[in-house]
Amino acid sequence: MENTTNINPIPYLTWSWLKINSDVASYDFTLKENSGKEINLTPNILITEGKSIKTDLPEPLFATGDAAAKLISDAAPKGKIYTFEKSNEEKPLIIRIKSEDNSATLQILHIKKGVSAKVIIVYEPSTALADSTTKESTEVPVLSGVITKVYAEDDSKLHLSKVQLCDKNVNQIDDTAIVCGERAKVDFTQIELGGSHVDAGFNATLYGYQSEFNSDTAYILTGNQYLDMNQVAVHKGKKTACDMKTHGTVKDESTKTYRGTIDLVKGCSGSNGNEIETTLLLSPKAVVKAAPIILCGEDDISAEHGSTIGKLSDDMLFYMNSRGIDEKTAEDLLSKAKITSAASSIEDESVTEEINSWIKNNL
């Protein structure tokens, strides 16, 4: 029996004819748990099984929606908790996840008070699936569901990076749910390159006084790829701050949907939020939809947002041509520059080399 669930619902509905209120996924299979493989694990990081932690922070909210989150959570009965007792300033913890079968991952990052942590999650390409009769590569669709919950306690710092290099047969639901205590700071870097139909979202709740959230998302879409993003920052504490950046390129017959919401609720006086989203559109057959939103329930705040879609400007093209660079090469350079700019903040050379290699071999 086929089941259908809404994914990435916009916090406040807009006109339905825009077809941007949510995405939809249908499935008629079960998921099995896939907890991934850890690299650079140190004694400062305690790993336990479980789906909840003891904390004074409220539960983070899901960007992909409660129904999709429950689907993934129920399929990962063990779950995995990473508790950062002390700072891991030297080497980031790397978690590698392969999507060879229909799978579900539930992970909790618990950053204790005053601790600084770095975590990189890499969604790896798998080896080519082979048909047992023909021995030839086949494109068997698989679903990868991932929930990453982040509890950043008071005065803690976290740089979380997610690098998506999945095979073209992978459909992915990737949710990052974050809650920040007083003066906690979370930086989030997100690279979206592979996959077929990807729903990627985050919801950051700035709960504590002077808490801060910054995100930098970059992507390139080619062929018939579909990327659906739902990015939400909720300001609850006083003098909180967020800065959300999303830049990417859409080619061929690919589709991108972007929802970006800054919610400044009553009581968050002195807070400020910024949101910018740009898309380089390189095909008349590509589809681009965007809904940047600011919700304001408080007077003493500052917020800005914007979304732009377009081709290379005439000035930029003239600049490139004057230096012997043709239009297609210029488009490729700028597309890749969006990725390399975001990836430059990832503090592991092997992962950045992996990103560069993927771009070289696939674009």
Image (cartoon, grey):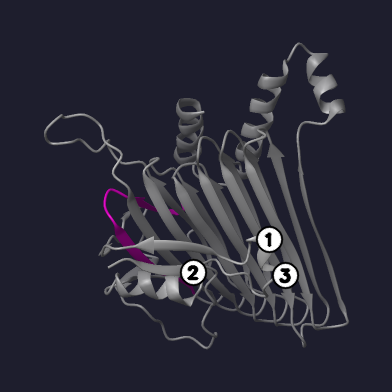
Amino acid at dot 2: Asn
- Looking at the rendering, the stretch of residues picked out in magenta corresponds to 91-111
Amino acid type, callout 1: Leu
Q: Mark 1 — residue?
A: 18
What secondary structure is found at the residue carrying circle 3?
strand
How dense is the environment of label 1, judged by Cα within 10 Å: few (below 14), some, or many (20 and up)? Answer: few
> In this rendering, which labeled residue sits more in front, label 3 or label 1?
1
Seen at 48% across and 52% down, the residue is 198
Residue 358 screen position, x and y as percent: 46, 33
Q: Residue at x 70, y 38 (%)?
A: 280
Dot 3 surroundings within 10 Å: few (below 14), some, or many (20 or more)? many
- Sequence order check: which comes first, mark 1 or mark 2? 2
In the rendered view, would you say 177 is above or below 318?
below
Q: Quadrant of residue 326?
A: top right
Q: Main secondary structure of the magenta part?
A: strand
Q: Are marks 1 and 2 in contact (CB under 8 Å)?
A: no
N-terminal-most mark, 3 or 2: 2
Find residue 6 and name its label. Answer: 2
| Label 1: element kind | helix
Q: Is residue 347 visible?
A: no
Q: Is 33 included in the stretch rendered in magenta?
A: no
Q: Residue at x 51, y 35 (%)?
A: 223
Residue at 55%, 71% in the rendered image: 178
Label 3 belongs to which residue? 262
Other-residue count near label 2 (Cα within 10 Å), few / some / many at <14 / 14–19 / ≥20:
some
Q: CA distance from mark 1 to mark 2?
A: 16 Å
Q: Amino acid at mark 3?
A: Ile
- The residues tagged by marks 3 and 1 sit, at their Cα atoms, a distance apart of 20 Å
State which quadrant residue 140 falls in. Answer: top left
